[in-house]
Image (cartoon, helix red, strand yellow):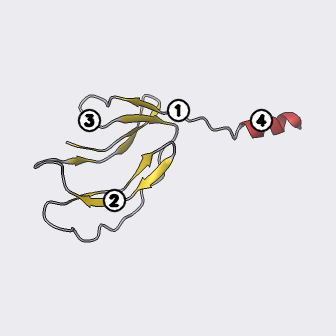
């Protein structure tokens, strides 16, 4: 009985591994190794665009030691012709990887 209790309690230990690295070829977002896939995306209401030159930057689950929803918002690109590449989650080489969004 004691052994079973010990195993159950030891199963509750959570160890996080976060590794920052350069993105795969062709990308510019920072990659972060995480221990689990993010929850399903939330549905957001974009509302009305506040004016010319604004683009919608959709909400996403960001990794901050755990998944936190970052609400979408209207924003202005940092320079003319900039394109927002949203953050994404991928499973590559047996690793869960979260790639931060960036302006290209």
Q: Which residue occupies the foreground of this view, 88 or 94?
A: 88
How far, Cα to Cα, is label 2 from label 1?
27 Å
Q: Position of residue 41 (x, y in %)?
A: 42, 56
Q: Specify which label sits upstream in the sequence, 4 or 3.
A: 4
Q: Specify which label sits upstream in the sequence, 2 or 4.
A: 4
The residue drawn where x is 13% and y is 64% is 52
Question: Which corner quadrant of the image does residue 22 belong to?
Answer: top left
- The local crowd at label 2, few if under 14, some if 14 to 19, many if 20 or more residues have their Cα within 10 Å, is some
- The local crowd at label 4, few if under 14, some if 14 to 19, many if 20 or more residues have their Cα within 10 Å, is few
**Extreme residue toward the left, this view:** 80
Residue tagged by mark 3? 28
- The local crowd at label 1, few if under 14, some if 14 to 19, many if 20 or more residues have their Cα within 10 Å, is few
How far, Cα to Cα, is label 2 from label 4?
42 Å
Q: Where is residue 103 in the image (x, y as percent from the top left)?
A: 22, 44
Question: Which mark is on residue 17?
Answer: 1
Q: Are marks 4 and 1 in contact (CB under 8 Å)?
A: no
How far, Cα to Cα, is label 3 from label 2?
21 Å
């Amino acid at each position: 009985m004691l052994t079973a209790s010990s195993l159950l309690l030891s199963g509750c230990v959570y160890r996080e591994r976060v590794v920052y690295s350069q993105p795969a070829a062709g990308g510019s977002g920072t990659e972060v190794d995480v221990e689990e896939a993010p929850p399903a995306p939330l549905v957001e209401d974009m509302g009305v665009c506040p004016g010319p030159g604004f683009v919608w930057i959709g909400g996403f689950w960001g990794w901050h030691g755990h998944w936190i929803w970052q609400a979408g918002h209207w924003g202005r690109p940092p320079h003319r012709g900039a394109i927002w590449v949203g953050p994404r989650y991928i499973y590559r080489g047996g690793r869960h990887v979260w790639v931060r969004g960036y302006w290209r």
